Image (cartoon, grey):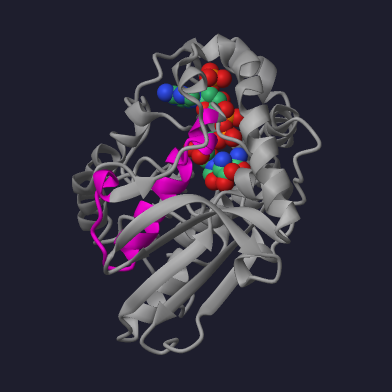
Amino acid sequence: MSGRPQVAEVAKPAPRRIALLGVGTVGRALLERLRALDDPRLPLGLVANSRRRLPLIGASSPRAWPDALAQGEPHDGSGALPGLAPGDIVVDATASAELAAWHPRWLRQGLHVVSANKLGLGGPLLRQHEIRALATDGRHYGDAATVGAGLPLLRTLRELRAGGDRIGAVVGVLSGTLAWLFDGYDGCEPFSARVRAAVAQGYAEPDPRVDLSGEDVCRKLLILARTAGYPLEQAEVRVDSLLTPALAAAAPDHVDAALAELDGPLAERAARTARDGKVLRYVARFDAAGARIGLEALPADDPLAVGRGCDNRVAIWSTRYRDRPLQIQGPGAGAEVTAAALLDDLLRIVAS
Ligand SMILES: NC(=O)C1=CN([C@@H]2O[C@H](COP(=O)(O)OP(=O)(O)OC[C@H]3O[C@@H](n4cnc5c(N)ncnc54)[C@H](OP(=O)(O)O)[C@@H]3O)[C@@H](O)[C@H]2O)C=CC1
Ligand SMILES: N[C@@H](CC=O)C(=O)O
């Protein structure tokens, strides 16, 4: 017998499994990142779209998943996910309202949630309160991808408040799609062609009207405002939509044709703005007096006008940034940055 003390074998906890819901622009890019990272702490347990699901036993993003998913089990698109256990992580890379309502339920089941879907925290205020209340005692809710596609906006607001700051106001360009559409737009080219290009770039929502109506920006503004200590409901935000009534009412398979409705009015507005030496930006803002969102003509050297491409740019006034705001700028849409933000949240959870 050796003189070494006898140590009882401690069973290693099973690694958390990831259930990825949504394998479109963002979900696919996340699968690529997971495969490249090949971290044994991040095995996939399930991949699903709205029609099929594929249970994967401990695999890390197999190359052949698209074919395998096409042959997978039928899936009804709901948040009832077989085979998951407390400690596993659900990644919501969809824009589904139905799944957003599952976020608090998943947390109650002891699952962690990582979301690119803004309807969890940017939907009804009550749901946001529920999620925040449930994401405690070791249960995590990753929200980095929901605003600014991972730019350090929510994190900064939390840190400012944790340090005793009161947030006075937030003003910014919060849509990557709309930033890209208005960057350099002088009215010479059909606006509808630019919208199609933004969809092809992977910046737009599954239905681009959600960007053009200001709805996507409104969800982000609500998430920012609530994180900043302003418990706003959607009805309290004044939103100026870019949609024409016909485009708003178009059936989903007629949206593409109806986009031409935008060409005349927006070309005229852009040309007038350019003649005045200004640029158009879709700006969102809130402070103690209220919240509003809409297209503004800004001087070309305005701090909110300097971003390029799909950049978001946000100015934050707080107790310590009273005279000149803290400003955060960078790409605010796109598969790569968004997937990276989801992965950052996943890594924070497995490291906790
Ligand atoms: N694109 C971007 O730059 C950014 C996007 N986001 C957010 O990421 C989310 C996804 O966006 P994106 O990847 O561009 O969208 P896509 O339309 O490219 O992909 C959506 C995916 O979700 C799936 N899906 C829809 N409903 C369900 C459901 N009920 N259950 C399971 N899967 C479902 C779709 O499956 P099917 O094909 O079967 O319909 C599809 O695979 C959105 O909430 C968006 O706001 C956030 C930051 C940036
Ligand atoms: N459609 C959104 C995607 C990121 O949230 C945008 O354009 O900003």
Residue 50 vertical position relative to residue 153 in the rendered view, above or below:
above
Q: Tell me if I can see residue 5 in this picture.
A: no
Q: Residue 229: percent from the left, percent from the top?
A: 27, 68
In the image: residue 41, left or right of residue 203 = left
Front residue of 261 and 34: 261
Who's the residue at 70% across and 71% down the image? 301
Q: In which quarter of the image is residue 225?
A: bottom left
In the image: residue 334, left or right of residue 323 = right
Q: Residue 130: percent from the left, percent from the top?
A: 20, 49
Q: Residue 349: percent from the left, percent from the top?
A: 44, 58
224 part of magenta stretch? yes
305 part of magenta stretch? no
In the image: residue 256, left or right of residue 2 = right
Q: Residue 347: percent from the left, percent from the top?
A: 53, 58
Residue 5 vertical position relative to residue 352 in the rendered view, above or below:
below
Front residue of 221 and 107: 221
Front residue of 183 and 268: 268
| Magenta segment boundaries in residue numbering | 209-236
Front residue of 42 and 299: 299
Labels in figure, total: 0
Q: In which quarter of the image is residue 168?
A: bottom left
In the image: residue 291, left or right of residue 29 = left
Q: Magenta segment, principal secondary structure?
A: helix
Q: Tell me if I can see residue 4 in this picture.
A: yes
Q: In which quarter of the image is the C terminus?
A: bottom left
Who's the residue at 49% across and 33% down the image? 210
